Image: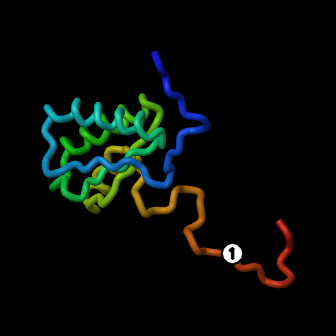
Amino acid sequence: MNCVTSSGLQIVDATTPAVLVLPGPVTRDEVPRLCDEVRAQLEGTGGGVVVCDVGGIGPPGLGVIDVLARLQLAAKRAGGRIRLRGPDPALRALLGLVGLAFDVEGEVEEGEPAGGVEEAVEPGDPAL
């Protein structure tokens, strides 16, 4: 039996996470399939993040919140997380209302300075 092994590390593009598009209203029957897809994408890429494009998911409601919470739980169990792409302001408000925090693509993560922002130092300022 022949076995071909590759030498060195596998090349993974960590700057391009997997994307899962959630089209239209998602029914409860689709949730297990979507959770399986999130786990598979995390295992396949090894990146730790799956971007969920929620721009076309429709009007936010508790059903959408339930789907996103289950996807986040599936991602955490697989050692990763999800990041939202294109959430409606109403969806973001509803997520905040129920106490669920999600990273949103294009936003600065908490505790990090915004890109391209430099702190100015005036002459005579004391060193920290």
From the image, tell me which residue sits under label 1.
Answer: 119
Quarter-wise, where is residue 26 in the image? top left
Of 80 and 12, nearer the camera is 12
Measured along the vertical axis of the image, is residue 82 above or below residue 110? above
**Percent position of residue 99, x then y:** 37, 44
Measured along the vertical axis of the image, is residue 32 above or below residue 46? above
Left or right of residue 103, residue 63 in this image: left
For the residue carrying disc 1, how many other residues have a C-alpha within 10 Å: few (<14), some (14-19), or many (20+)? few
Of 32 and 95, nearer the camera is 32
**Percent position of residue 38, x then y:** 33, 37
Give the colour scheme shown: rainbow
Residue at the spot 28% in from the left edge and 62% down from the top edge:
89
**Percent position of residue 86, x then y:** 30, 60
- Taking the view exactly as shown, the residue that stands out farthest to the front is 1
Residue at the spot 19% in from the left edge and 57% down from the top edge:
56
Report the number of discs.
1
Of 8 and 99, nearer the camera is 8
Residue at the spot 85% in from the left edge and 70% down from the top edge:
127
Residue at the spot 31% in from the left edge and 56% down from the top edge:
93
Quarter-wise, where is residue 62 in the image? top left
Left or right of residue 15, residue 66 in this image: left
- Taking the view exactly as shown, the residue that stands out farthest to the top is 1
For the C terminus, give its image quadrant. bottom right
SS under mark 1: loop
For the N terminus, give its image quadrant. top left
- Badge 1 amino acid: Glu
Left or right of residue 112, residue 22 in this image: left
Measured along the vertical axis of the image, is residue 79 above or below residue 101? above
**Percent position of residue 78, x then y:** 42, 30
